[in-house]
Image (cartoon, rainbow, N blue to C red):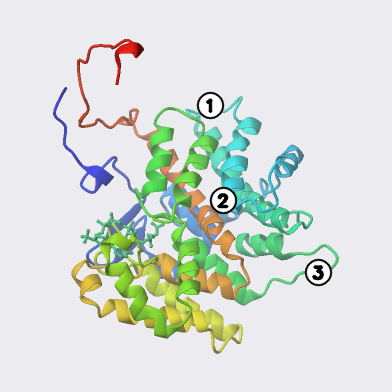
Amino acid sequence: IGVFTFDPGYGETASCESQITYIDGDAGVLQYRGYPIEQLAENSDFVEVCYLLMYGELPTTEQLAKFRDGVTRHTMVHEQIRNFFNGFRRDAHPMAIMCGVVGALAAFYHDNLDINDAKQREIAAFRLVAKVPTIAAMAYKYSQGQPFVYPRNDLSYAANFLHMLNSVPAEEYKVSPTLEKAMDLILILHADHEQNASTSTVRLVGSTGANPFACVAAGIAALWGPSHGGANEAVLKMLAEIGDKSNIPQFISEVKDKNSHTKLMGFGHRVYKNFDPRAKIMKETCHKVLAELGVTNEPLLELAMELEKIALEDEYFVSRKLYPNVDFYSGIIQKAMGIPTSMFTVIFAVARTIGWISQWKELIEDPAQRIGRPRQIYTGAVDLQYKDIASRG
Ligand code: CMC
Protein backbone atom coordinates (compact mmCIF):
# COMPACT_ATOMS: atom_id res chain seq x y z
CA ILE A 1 0.00 0.00 0.00
CA GLY A 2 2.90 2.37 0.67
CA VAL A 3 3.54 4.88 3.42
CA PHE A 4 3.44 8.57 2.59
CA THR A 5 3.65 11.80 4.51
CA PHE A 6 0.10 12.79 5.44
CA ASP A 7 -0.38 16.54 5.00
CA PRO A 8 -4.06 17.42 4.55
CA GLY A 9 -4.39 20.90 3.05
CA TYR A 10 -0.63 20.81 2.21
CA GLY A 11 0.21 23.05 5.19
CA GLU A 12 3.72 21.59 5.42
CA THR A 13 4.39 20.71 1.79
CA ALA A 14 6.32 22.88 -0.69
CA SER A 15 5.09 21.89 -4.14
CA CYS A 16 7.61 23.89 -6.16
CA GLU A 17 10.51 26.31 -6.14
CA SER A 18 9.51 29.81 -7.17
CA GLN A 19 11.11 33.23 -7.54
CA ILE A 20 7.89 35.20 -7.96
CA THR A 21 6.31 36.04 -4.60
CA TYR A 22 7.81 36.00 -1.12
CA ILE A 23 5.68 35.88 2.03
CA ASP A 24 6.87 35.92 5.63
CA GLY A 25 3.65 35.09 7.40
CA ASP A 26 4.93 35.73 10.92
CA ALA A 27 6.31 39.16 10.06
CA GLY A 28 3.42 40.19 7.78
CA VAL A 29 5.71 40.62 4.75
CA LEU A 30 4.65 40.32 1.11
CA GLN A 31 7.02 40.99 -1.78
CA TYR A 32 6.69 40.58 -5.53
CA ARG A 33 10.06 39.60 -7.02
CA GLY A 34 11.71 41.03 -3.92
CA TYR A 35 9.89 44.39 -3.92
CA PRO A 36 7.72 45.11 -0.84
CA ILE A 37 4.02 45.36 -1.67
CA GLU A 38 3.83 48.73 0.13
CA GLN A 39 6.37 50.25 -2.29
CA LEU A 40 4.62 48.84 -5.34
CA ALA A 41 1.22 50.03 -4.09
CA GLU A 42 2.65 53.52 -3.60
CA ASN A 43 4.72 53.92 -6.74
CA SER A 44 3.77 51.44 -9.42
CA ASP A 45 0.77 50.78 -11.61
CA PHE A 46 -0.86 47.45 -12.37
CA VAL A 47 0.66 46.97 -15.82
CA GLU A 48 4.15 47.64 -14.48
CA VAL A 49 3.47 45.09 -11.71
CA CYS A 50 2.36 42.62 -14.41
CA TYR A 51 5.71 43.11 -16.15
CA LEU A 52 7.55 42.63 -12.88
CA LEU A 53 5.71 39.43 -12.04
CA MET A 54 6.12 37.98 -15.52
CA TYR A 55 9.74 38.87 -16.26
CA GLY A 56 11.23 39.25 -12.78
CA GLU A 57 12.52 42.84 -13.14
CA LEU A 58 11.02 46.31 -13.08
CA PRO A 59 10.87 47.49 -16.71
CA THR A 60 12.73 50.36 -18.35
CA THR A 61 10.55 53.05 -19.98
CA GLU A 62 10.99 51.34 -23.33
CA GLN A 63 10.24 47.85 -22.02
CA LEU A 64 7.14 49.11 -20.26
CA ALA A 65 5.83 50.89 -23.36
CA LYS A 66 6.35 47.74 -25.43
CA PHE A 67 4.65 45.61 -22.79
CA ARG A 68 1.65 47.96 -22.52
CA ASP A 69 1.33 47.81 -26.27
CA GLY A 70 1.51 44.00 -26.15
CA VAL A 71 -1.34 43.90 -23.63
CA THR A 72 -3.57 46.54 -25.22
CA ARG A 73 -3.44 45.02 -28.68
CA HIS A 74 -5.21 41.94 -27.31
CA THR A 75 -8.04 43.57 -25.36
CA MET A 76 -10.77 42.74 -27.90
CA VAL A 77 -12.42 39.33 -27.88
CA HIS A 78 -13.42 37.36 -30.96
CA GLU A 79 -16.95 38.29 -32.06
CA GLN A 80 -17.97 34.63 -31.70
CA ILE A 81 -17.38 34.98 -27.96
CA ARG A 82 -20.38 37.31 -27.77
CA ASN A 83 -22.55 34.30 -28.65
CA PHE A 84 -21.47 32.41 -25.55
CA PHE A 85 -23.21 34.93 -23.34
CA ASN A 86 -26.64 34.29 -24.83
CA GLY A 87 -26.45 30.75 -23.46
CA PHE A 88 -26.36 31.99 -19.87
CA ARG A 89 -29.30 33.06 -17.75
CA ARG A 90 -29.25 36.79 -17.07
CA ASP A 91 -29.03 36.07 -13.34
CA ALA A 92 -26.09 33.67 -13.71
CA HIS A 93 -23.33 34.43 -11.22
CA PRO A 94 -20.58 36.26 -13.17
CA MET A 95 -17.99 33.81 -11.76
CA ALA A 96 -19.89 30.97 -13.46
CA ILE A 97 -19.67 32.92 -16.71
CA MET A 98 -15.96 33.56 -16.14
CA CYS A 99 -15.22 29.84 -15.62
CA GLY A 100 -16.95 29.02 -18.90
CA VAL A 101 -15.90 31.87 -21.17
CA VAL A 102 -12.24 32.08 -20.10
CA GLY A 103 -11.96 28.29 -20.56
CA ALA A 104 -13.56 28.70 -23.97
CA LEU A 105 -10.68 30.95 -25.07
CA ALA A 106 -8.84 27.67 -25.57
CA ALA A 107 -11.21 26.93 -28.43
CA PHE A 108 -9.98 30.07 -30.17
CA TYR A 109 -6.25 29.94 -29.49
CA HIS A 110 -5.44 26.33 -28.63
CA ASP A 111 -4.94 24.62 -31.97
CA ASN A 112 -1.51 25.99 -32.85
CA LEU A 113 -0.35 26.74 -29.33
CA ASP A 114 3.06 25.23 -28.62
CA ILE A 115 3.61 25.72 -24.90
CA ASN A 116 7.30 24.90 -25.35
CA ASP A 117 7.78 27.98 -27.51
CA ALA A 118 8.64 31.04 -25.36
CA LYS A 119 7.14 33.52 -27.84
CA GLN A 120 3.83 31.63 -27.91
CA ARG A 121 3.75 31.45 -24.12
CA GLU A 122 4.20 35.21 -24.03
CA ILE A 123 1.37 35.82 -26.52
CA ALA A 124 -0.92 33.53 -24.50
CA ALA A 125 -0.06 35.60 -21.40
CA PHE A 126 -0.85 38.86 -23.22
CA ARG A 127 -4.12 37.44 -24.46
CA LEU A 128 -5.22 36.36 -21.00
CA VAL A 129 -4.21 39.52 -19.15
CA ALA A 130 -5.82 41.67 -21.86
CA LYS A 131 -9.04 39.73 -22.44
CA VAL A 132 -10.01 38.75 -18.91
CA PRO A 133 -11.23 42.27 -17.97
CA THR A 134 -13.14 42.48 -21.26
CA ILE A 135 -14.89 39.18 -20.51
CA ALA A 136 -15.50 40.22 -16.89
CA ALA A 137 -17.13 43.47 -18.01
CA MET A 138 -19.21 41.60 -20.58
CA ALA A 139 -20.44 39.24 -17.84
CA TYR A 140 -21.59 42.26 -15.84
CA LYS A 141 -23.19 44.05 -18.78
CA TYR A 142 -25.02 40.87 -19.74
CA SER A 143 -26.46 40.58 -16.22
CA GLN A 144 -27.75 44.14 -16.53
CA GLY A 145 -29.28 43.60 -19.95
CA GLN A 146 -27.05 46.36 -21.31
CA PRO A 147 -25.00 46.31 -24.51
CA PHE A 148 -21.36 45.25 -24.28
CA VAL A 149 -18.84 48.08 -24.20
CA TYR A 150 -15.75 47.75 -26.36
CA PRO A 151 -12.35 48.32 -24.76
CA ARG A 152 -10.57 51.66 -25.14
CA ASN A 153 -6.86 51.25 -25.59
CA ASP A 154 -6.11 54.93 -24.88
CA LEU A 155 -7.06 54.41 -21.23
CA SER A 156 -5.02 52.79 -18.47
CA TYR A 157 -5.78 49.13 -17.67
CA ALA A 158 -7.81 50.13 -14.60
CA ALA A 159 -9.62 53.01 -16.32
CA ASN A 160 -10.47 50.86 -19.34
CA PHE A 161 -11.92 48.20 -17.05
CA LEU A 162 -14.08 50.80 -15.29
CA HIS A 163 -15.07 52.21 -18.68
CA MET A 164 -16.23 48.77 -19.90
CA LEU A 165 -18.14 48.18 -16.66
CA ASN A 166 -19.85 51.55 -16.52
CA SER A 167 -20.24 53.11 -19.94
CA VAL A 168 -23.66 53.52 -21.36
CA PRO A 169 -23.17 54.20 -25.09
CA ALA A 170 -25.61 57.10 -25.16
CA GLU A 171 -23.51 59.16 -22.79
CA GLU A 172 -19.80 59.68 -22.42
CA TYR A 173 -18.57 58.02 -19.21
CA LYS A 174 -15.66 59.85 -17.62
CA VAL A 175 -13.54 57.66 -15.37
CA SER A 176 -12.89 59.41 -12.08
CA PRO A 177 -9.17 59.52 -11.17
CA THR A 178 -10.07 58.45 -7.61
CA LEU A 179 -11.83 55.33 -8.84
CA GLU A 180 -9.09 54.62 -11.37
CA LYS A 181 -6.42 54.80 -8.66
CA ALA A 182 -8.50 52.64 -6.29
CA MET A 183 -9.10 50.01 -8.97
CA ASP A 184 -5.42 50.00 -9.88
CA LEU A 185 -4.50 49.45 -6.24
CA ILE A 186 -7.01 46.62 -5.83
CA LEU A 187 -5.49 44.96 -8.91
CA ILE A 188 -1.91 45.37 -7.60
CA LEU A 189 -2.74 43.97 -4.15
CA HIS A 190 -4.42 40.88 -5.61
CA ALA A 191 -1.94 40.21 -8.43
CA ASP A 192 -0.11 37.23 -6.90
CA HIS A 193 0.13 35.39 -3.61
CA GLU A 194 2.45 32.41 -4.18
CA GLN A 195 1.00 28.89 -3.82
CA ASN A 196 -2.60 29.63 -2.73
CA ALA A 197 -5.38 27.23 -3.74
CA SER A 198 -6.10 28.76 -7.15
CA THR A 199 -2.44 29.16 -8.13
CA SER A 200 -1.70 25.60 -7.03
CA THR A 201 -4.64 24.52 -9.17
CA VAL A 202 -3.23 26.38 -12.18
CA ARG A 203 0.14 24.70 -11.60
CA LEU A 204 -1.39 21.25 -11.16
CA VAL A 205 -3.42 21.55 -14.36
CA GLY A 206 -0.41 23.10 -16.11
CA SER A 207 1.80 20.19 -15.04
CA THR A 208 -0.21 17.91 -17.33
CA GLY A 209 0.71 20.04 -20.35
CA ALA A 210 -2.80 21.52 -20.63
CA ASN A 211 -3.06 24.84 -22.46
CA PRO A 212 -2.85 28.06 -20.39
CA PHE A 213 -6.46 29.08 -21.04
CA ALA A 214 -7.70 25.83 -19.50
CA CYS A 215 -5.24 26.28 -16.61
CA VAL A 216 -6.49 29.79 -15.83
CA ALA A 217 -10.14 28.70 -16.09
CA ALA A 218 -9.35 26.04 -13.47
CA GLY A 219 -7.76 28.77 -11.33
CA ILE A 220 -10.93 30.85 -11.61
CA ALA A 221 -13.02 27.90 -10.42
CA ALA A 222 -10.74 27.41 -7.39
CA LEU A 223 -10.82 31.12 -6.60
CA TRP A 224 -14.61 31.19 -6.46
CA GLY A 225 -14.94 29.37 -3.13
CA PRO A 226 -15.70 31.46 -0.03
CA SER A 227 -12.56 30.23 1.77
CA HIS A 228 -10.50 31.82 -1.00
CA GLY A 229 -11.44 34.68 -3.38
CA GLY A 230 -15.16 34.32 -2.74
CA ALA A 231 -14.53 35.69 0.76
CA ASN A 232 -14.83 39.33 -0.36
CA GLU A 233 -18.42 38.75 -1.46
CA ALA A 234 -19.07 36.71 1.69
CA VAL A 235 -17.80 39.57 3.91
CA LEU A 236 -20.43 41.92 2.55
CA LYS A 237 -23.16 39.33 2.98
CA MET A 238 -21.97 38.76 6.56
CA LEU A 239 -21.98 42.50 7.34
CA ALA A 240 -25.46 42.82 5.87
CA GLU A 241 -26.67 39.92 8.02
CA ILE A 242 -25.15 41.38 11.20
CA GLY A 243 -26.83 44.63 10.25
CA ASP A 244 -26.05 46.66 13.35
CA LYS A 245 -23.20 47.08 15.83
CA SER A 246 -25.44 45.88 18.63
CA ASN A 247 -25.64 42.45 16.98
CA ILE A 248 -21.86 41.91 16.89
CA PRO A 249 -21.52 40.12 20.29
CA GLN A 250 -24.25 37.66 19.30
CA PHE A 251 -22.53 37.04 15.94
CA ILE A 252 -19.14 36.53 17.60
CA SER A 253 -20.56 33.93 19.99
CA GLU A 254 -22.07 32.14 17.02
CA VAL A 255 -18.63 32.09 15.32
CA LYS A 256 -17.08 30.65 18.49
CA ASP A 257 -19.67 27.89 18.63
CA LYS A 258 -18.07 25.02 16.71
CA ASN A 259 -21.45 23.54 15.86
CA SER A 260 -22.62 26.66 14.06
CA HIS A 261 -20.08 26.38 11.16
CA THR A 262 -20.16 30.19 11.02
CA LYS A 263 -16.85 31.89 10.27
CA LEU A 264 -15.80 35.46 10.59
CA MET A 265 -15.32 36.05 6.88
CA GLY A 266 -12.31 38.13 5.90
CA PHE A 267 -10.42 36.88 8.96
CA GLY A 268 -7.68 34.27 9.18
CA HIS A 269 -5.08 33.06 6.76
CA ARG A 270 -3.05 29.89 6.30
CA VAL A 271 0.23 31.78 6.07
CA TYR A 272 -0.23 35.15 7.80
CA LYS A 273 -0.15 34.65 11.55
CA ASN A 274 0.51 38.30 12.29
CA PHE A 275 -1.33 40.62 9.90
CA ASP A 276 -2.00 40.55 6.20
CA PRO A 277 -0.07 43.53 4.77
CA ARG A 278 -2.62 43.79 1.96
CA ALA A 279 -5.40 44.29 4.52
CA LYS A 280 -3.49 47.18 6.07
CA ILE A 281 -3.17 48.98 2.72
CA MET A 282 -6.75 48.11 1.84
CA LYS A 283 -8.06 49.62 5.08
CA GLU A 284 -6.12 52.87 4.54
CA THR A 285 -7.33 53.02 0.94
CA CYS A 286 -10.88 52.40 2.07
CA HIS A 287 -10.79 55.52 4.24
CA LYS A 288 -9.13 57.56 1.46
CA VAL A 289 -11.56 56.46 -1.24
CA LEU A 290 -14.60 57.11 0.91
CA ALA A 291 -13.28 60.59 1.83
CA GLU A 292 -12.52 61.41 -1.81
CA LEU A 293 -15.94 60.20 -2.86
CA GLY A 294 -17.44 62.43 -0.18
CA VAL A 295 -18.87 59.50 1.77
CA THR A 296 -18.53 60.66 5.35
CA ASN A 297 -20.72 58.14 7.04
CA GLU A 298 -20.58 54.63 5.62
CA PRO A 299 -22.42 52.35 8.06
CA LEU A 300 -20.82 49.20 6.60
CA LEU A 301 -17.31 50.54 7.21
CA GLU A 302 -18.20 51.52 10.76
CA LEU A 303 -19.69 48.10 11.36
CA ALA A 304 -16.60 46.39 9.89
CA MET A 305 -14.24 48.48 12.04
CA GLU A 306 -16.18 47.69 15.19
CA LEU A 307 -16.27 44.00 14.29
CA GLU A 308 -12.50 44.03 13.68
CA LYS A 309 -11.87 45.79 16.99
CA ILE A 310 -13.99 43.33 18.98
CA ALA A 311 -12.46 40.31 17.24
CA LEU A 312 -8.88 41.52 17.74
CA GLU A 313 -9.52 41.77 21.49
CA ASP A 314 -11.26 38.41 21.78
CA GLU A 315 -9.31 35.46 23.17
CA TYR A 316 -10.73 33.08 20.51
CA PHE A 317 -9.17 35.10 17.64
CA VAL A 318 -6.04 36.15 19.56
CA SER A 319 -5.09 32.60 20.55
CA ARG A 320 -5.59 31.35 16.98
CA LYS A 321 -3.69 34.32 15.48
CA LEU A 322 -6.64 35.33 13.32
CA TYR A 323 -6.27 38.77 11.76
CA PRO A 324 -8.18 40.57 9.01
CA ASN A 325 -7.08 39.47 5.54
CA VAL A 326 -7.23 41.31 2.22
CA ASP A 327 -10.89 40.48 1.72
CA PHE A 328 -12.10 42.15 4.91
CA TYR A 329 -11.96 45.68 3.50
CA SER A 330 -11.79 45.15 -0.29
CA GLY A 331 -15.54 44.59 -0.59
CA ILE A 332 -16.34 47.81 1.27
CA ILE A 333 -14.16 49.84 -1.11
CA GLN A 334 -15.67 48.15 -4.13
CA LYS A 335 -19.18 48.76 -2.85
CA ALA A 336 -18.35 52.46 -2.38
CA MET A 337 -17.06 52.46 -5.96
CA GLY A 338 -20.49 51.32 -7.11
CA ILE A 339 -19.38 47.79 -8.02
CA PRO A 340 -22.05 45.15 -7.41
CA THR A 341 -21.23 42.45 -4.83
CA SER A 342 -21.37 39.62 -7.36
CA MET A 343 -18.45 41.22 -9.24
CA PHE A 344 -16.02 41.33 -6.30
CA THR A 345 -14.53 37.88 -6.88
CA VAL A 346 -14.50 38.52 -10.62
CA ILE A 347 -12.28 41.55 -10.02
CA PHE A 348 -10.02 39.37 -7.89
CA ALA A 349 -9.82 36.96 -10.85
CA VAL A 350 -8.95 39.79 -13.24
CA ALA A 351 -6.09 40.83 -10.94
CA ARG A 352 -4.86 37.29 -10.24
CA THR A 353 -4.68 36.34 -13.93
CA ILE A 354 -1.15 37.80 -14.18
CA GLY A 355 -0.09 35.81 -11.10
CA TRP A 356 -1.54 32.60 -12.53
CA ILE A 357 0.04 33.04 -15.93
CA SER A 358 3.43 34.05 -14.46
CA GLN A 359 3.37 30.96 -12.23
CA TRP A 360 2.34 28.81 -15.19
CA LYS A 361 5.24 30.24 -17.24
CA GLU A 362 7.67 29.56 -14.39
CA LEU A 363 6.36 25.99 -14.14
CA ILE A 364 6.76 25.28 -17.85
CA GLU A 365 10.26 26.80 -17.86
CA ASP A 366 11.37 24.78 -14.81
CA PRO A 367 13.49 21.81 -15.95
CA ALA A 368 12.59 19.97 -12.72
CA GLN A 369 8.85 20.18 -13.38
CA ARG A 370 6.90 16.95 -13.66
CA ILE A 371 3.25 16.05 -13.50
CA GLY A 372 1.66 16.89 -10.12
CA ARG A 373 0.43 13.68 -8.63
CA PRO A 374 -0.13 13.56 -4.82
CA ARG A 375 -0.36 10.20 -3.12
CA GLN A 376 -2.94 9.17 -0.51
CA ILE A 377 -3.35 7.17 2.67
CA TYR A 378 -5.87 4.55 1.68
CA THR A 379 -8.33 3.82 4.50
CA GLY A 380 -10.89 1.68 2.67
CA ALA A 381 -11.39 -2.07 2.41
CA VAL A 382 -9.12 -4.39 0.38
CA ASP A 383 -9.32 -7.78 -1.26
CA LEU A 384 -13.07 -8.26 -0.96
CA GLN A 385 -14.83 -11.07 -2.83
CA TYR A 386 -17.40 -9.97 -5.41
CA LYS A 387 -20.94 -10.93 -4.37
CA ASP A 388 -23.74 -11.64 -6.77
CA ILE A 389 -26.53 -9.01 -6.42
CA ALA A 390 -28.97 -11.64 -5.14
CA SER A 391 -26.73 -12.48 -2.22
CA ARG A 392 -26.09 -8.91 -1.01
CA GLY A 393 -27.70 -7.10 1.93
N1 CMC B 1 -13.52 32.50 11.76
C1 CMC B 1 -13.55 31.71 12.84
N2 CMC B 1 -12.63 30.78 13.13
C2 CMC B 1 -11.61 30.65 12.27
C3 CMC B 1 -11.51 31.44 11.11
C4 CMC B 1 -12.51 32.41 10.87
N3 CMC B 1 -12.46 33.18 9.79
N4 CMC B 1 -10.40 31.08 10.42
C5 CMC B 1 -9.83 30.09 11.13
N5 CMC B 1 -10.56 29.82 12.26
C6 CMC B 1 -10.24 28.86 13.30
C7 CMC B 1 -10.44 27.43 12.83
O1 CMC B 1 -11.76 27.01 13.07
C8 CMC B 1 -9.42 26.71 13.67
O2 CMC B 1 -9.93 26.58 14.97
P1 CMC B 1 -9.60 25.27 15.88
O3 CMC B 1 -8.10 25.28 16.04
O4 CMC B 1 -10.35 25.48 17.14
O5 CMC B 1 -10.07 24.10 15.09
C9 CMC B 1 -8.25 27.68 13.75
O6 CMC B 1 -8.84 28.97 13.57
C10 CMC B 1 -7.19 27.45 12.70
O7 CMC B 1 -7.80 27.58 11.42
P2 CMC B 1 -7.59 26.60 10.21
O8 CMC B 1 -8.93 26.12 9.74
O9 CMC B 1 -6.55 25.58 10.50
O10 CMC B 1 -7.00 27.61 9.14
P3 CMC B 1 -6.69 27.31 7.63
O11 CMC B 1 -5.32 27.76 7.40
O12 CMC B 1 -7.01 25.91 7.28
O13 CMC B 1 -7.76 28.23 6.87
C11 CMC B 1 -8.76 30.16 5.94
C12 CMC B 1 -7.45 29.50 6.40
C13 CMC B 1 -8.41 31.46 5.24
C14 CMC B 1 -9.46 29.24 4.91
C15 CMC B 1 -9.67 30.40 7.18
O14 CMC B 1 -9.01 31.27 8.08
C16 CMC B 1 -11.03 30.96 6.77
O15 CMC B 1 -11.91 30.17 6.42
N6 CMC B 1 -11.22 32.31 6.82
C17 CMC B 1 -12.47 32.90 6.39
C18 CMC B 1 -12.53 32.97 4.87
C19 CMC B 1 -11.61 34.04 4.32
O16 CMC B 1 -11.59 35.17 4.77
N7 CMC B 1 -10.84 33.68 3.28
C20 CMC B 1 -9.93 34.61 2.58
C21 CMC B 1 -8.50 34.25 2.76
S1 CMC B 1 -7.35 35.51 2.22
C22 CMC B 1 -7.62 35.76 0.54
C23 CMC B 1 -7.61 34.54 -0.29
O17 CMC B 1 -6.93 33.54 -0.03
O18 CMC B 1 -8.32 34.53 -1.30
Q: Which quadrant is the C terminus positioned in?
A: top left
Of residues 111 and 107, the one nearer the viewer is 107
Figure quadrant of residue 341: bottom right
Measure the alpha-carbon separation of dots 3 and 2. 28 Å
**Residue lying farthest left?**
3
Instruction: Report if the beta carbon of the residue with label 1 is closer than 8 angstroms to ligand 1.
Output: no
Residue type at mark 3 is Glu
Figure quadrant of residue 284: bottom left
The residue under label 2 is 95
The residue under label 3 is 172
The residue under label 1 is 114
Measure the alpha-carbon separation of dots 1 and 2. 28 Å
Ligand 1 occupies quarter: bottom left
Q: Residue 66, can we see it? A: no
Labels in figure, total: 3
Q: Which quadrant is the N terminus positioned in?
A: top left
Q: Is residue 135 left or right of residue 25?
A: right
Residue type at mark 2 is Met
Q: Position of residue 257 (x, y in %)?
A: 27, 66
Measure the alpha-carbon separation of dots 3 and 1. 42 Å
Q: Label 2 crowding class (10 Å Cα cut-off): few <14, some 14-19, many 20+? A: many
